[in-house]
Image (cartoon, rainbow, N blue to C red):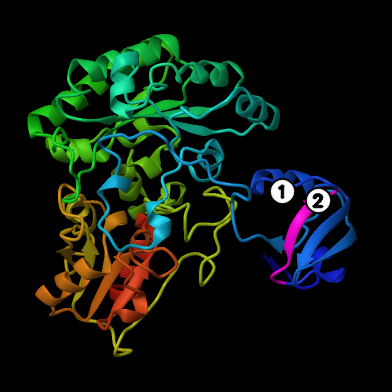
Amino acid sequence: MSVAPNSPAAKVGLVEGDIILSINGQVPTDVINYHILVEEPELTLEVERGGITFDFDIEKMAGEQLGIEISAAIFDQVRTCDNHCEFCFIYQLPPGLRKTLYMKDDDYRLSFLYGNFTTLTRFTEADLERVLTERLSPLFVSIHSTHPLLRTELLRNRRGGTSLRWLEYLLDGGIEVHGQVVVCPSINDGSHVEETLMTLLMRYDKLADVAVVPLGISKYSHEERMRVHSREEALAVVDAVDRVSALAMKLIGRPFAYASDEYYVLAEKEMPRLGTYLDFSQHENGIGITRAFESSFAGDEEYAFGVKSGFFSWVEGAPKEGYRAVRHFDGGEEVVISRIRSRKRPNKVAILTSTYGAKTLPPIVSPLFPEVDFVEVKNEYFGGNIAVAGLMVGEDITRSVAENPDYDLYLLPDVALSEDVFLDGVRLSDLTFPLRVVASDGLSLRKELEALYRSA
């Protein structure tokens, strides 16, 4: 842990590296529990330092920050996932990555903190009691199918067919829940998608929303049944979502189900209008990213939230308090890392973007900045159908720049990074070409381009 100067913790002598063993006699199990305990105005912290245990008594105002930044979100043990889903991306990672990237969790606490999706197959009565008592809301739940046998098959877990009972208890307890359906062609697509969405609408209409997303397949997948969608299959999914959403508007007054932006790209169909997405609560899951980017690029600050973190955000690089925590960036607003060989204004600028970005960004950016080019970073590192910005790696970026070397400056979305490190272990400091990292929302990119091209 680290200690802020002049904070209540610092004033009693707590220092960086101390290990908190208990707070007022209670052992915190996670950062959620920790923040509840330290709200008290009078605290006794049992602390280990150099193998010796000390007690520190602290008096502060009720609600005053203690001044300690802890180094982990979960103190006891992350609840790992005991499902064996054929489409799980963790099973499709190449060997040799950082060990943290292979952690496969199914922990409702990480769902609350970071927006991770939990299947509820390891959820218990004690977990339900805590969620309801401490109001750990919202939570994010992987559904995939409401048919008990099919869900059991998809999760490869005998509890798959019964664990959705917890969903009803959570919703009846007033917990905000967001659902997800990962669609696997020829398994839970076609009529299964519409059946799942209709069942959710009829039985679980208190769900905040349901995101329908295509499975991601890397070249390291060994599952014979897993394959990419055809355009016709993607279009069928979009049409099913549209039908259920239209019915939901009549029954409950909101769309309820959303297809991810990837589906619209795959189906070659125009994306829904901006207002369809309401509060963009599943933005991190690929729902409405394009419309939010488009609107913020046009200058609307309301939608300038970008993508806060990549696929592996919770294990490294994200605020320990979770994705809803205040994020501190260099310069106060965004991460900007410059490696420009000259202070002169660059003549040729290219935006490094993923395969999906190369299809969605030019129609938004080019009308205002026709002088800016796009360099598509094809994901050869993961291969398969991996085509999103959050999974771009240093190796592919370096190759793409080498194939397109005639630019004075390259702009890169920050979602590809975790604490200045790409998923393949390449660091920003390893790159030798002129690069600037920009926050992934449209407004940040527009400000960057205006500074390059429109300033006097």
Q: Report if residue 22 lies within the magenta region.
A: yes
Residue 232 is covered by the magenta coloring:
no
The residue closer to the viewer here, 312 or 241, is: 312
Q: Position of residue 420 (x, y in %)?
A: 41, 70
Q: Is residue 298 left or right of residue 109?
A: left
Q: Which residues lie in the magenta part?
A: 16-24
Which residue is identified by label 2? 23
Whole-percent x, y for residue 449 in the image:
31, 69
Tell me the quarter of the image containing the C terminus.
bottom left
User: Disc 1 or 2, which lies upstream in sequence?
Assistant: 2
Query: Which residue is labeled 1 in the image?
Result: 34
- The answer to which of 158 and 379 lies nearer the viewer is 158
Q: Looking at the image, which residue is at 19% across and 45% down?
A: 221
- Residue depth check, mark 1 versus mark 2: number of the one nearer the observer: 2
**Quarter of the view holding residue 44:** bottom right
Q: Residues within 10 Å of mark 1 (few under 14, many from 20)?
A: many
**Foreground pick, 193 / 79:** 79
